[in-house]
Amino acid sequence: PLAAPRLDGEYRIANVTVTDINTNKRIHLEHVDLRPVLDRIAAGRKDPHRNDGTVFRNSSRLLPQRPQGYYREYVIRTPGISGPGPQRLILGRDGEVYYTHDHYETFITVKGGT
């Protein structure tokens, strides 16, 4: 069994295995640095994926329950995977940051949250 990804410093995730949802190809990443994506968001630049910056509904209820529109989702591109891949950042209105490497099946709290 693979070790789970974990927070490894501020805005850095260690030991990430990403699976391409289209091909089932697995890619292991020693670290995923979230800062470039956070910088892109802060600068108002969008990823071309249609859902980048849209409301995340939290329908699986894995994140704390908040009013509709509280969370937004952002694409994290994965080297070696065509298309957006499964990695996402979820940002809460009050500054919370959550990371998922498996397209919303599990989350790591990066900043704030519970």
Image (cartoon, helix red, strand yellow):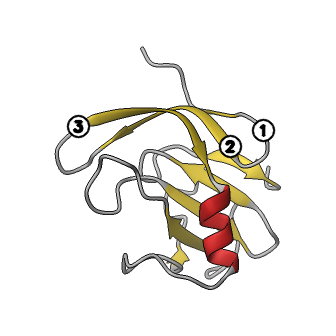
Extreme residue in the top direction: 1
Query: Which of pointers 3 and 2 lies earlier in the amino acid sequence?
Result: 2
Is residue 70 in view? yes
What residue do we see at 79% from left, 55% from top? Answer: 113
- Judging depth in this view, the residue of 104 and 14 nearest the camera is 14
- 101 above or below 15? below
The residue singled out by tag 1 in the image is 9
Label 3 – label 1 distance at C-alpha: 28 Å
Q: Name the spot of residue 32 as percent of width and height, x first.
A: 57, 43
Label 3 or label 1, whichever comes before in sequence order: 1
Q: Is residue 63 visible?
A: no
Q: Where does label 3 land, which residue?
A: 25
Front one among 16 and 59? 16
> Around disc 1, counting alpha carbons within 10 Å, would you say few (fewer than 14), some (14 to 19), or many (20 or more)?
few
- In three-dimensional space, the C-alpha distance between marks 1 and 2, rounded to whole angstroms, equals 6 Å
User: Measuring 68% from the left and 69% from the top, which residue is drawn there?
Assistant: 39
Mark 3 touching mark 1, by CB under 8 A? no
Q: Residue at x 72, y 49 (%)?
A: 11
Callout 1, which amino acid? Gly
Q: Are marks 3 and 2 in contact (CB under 8 Å)?
A: no
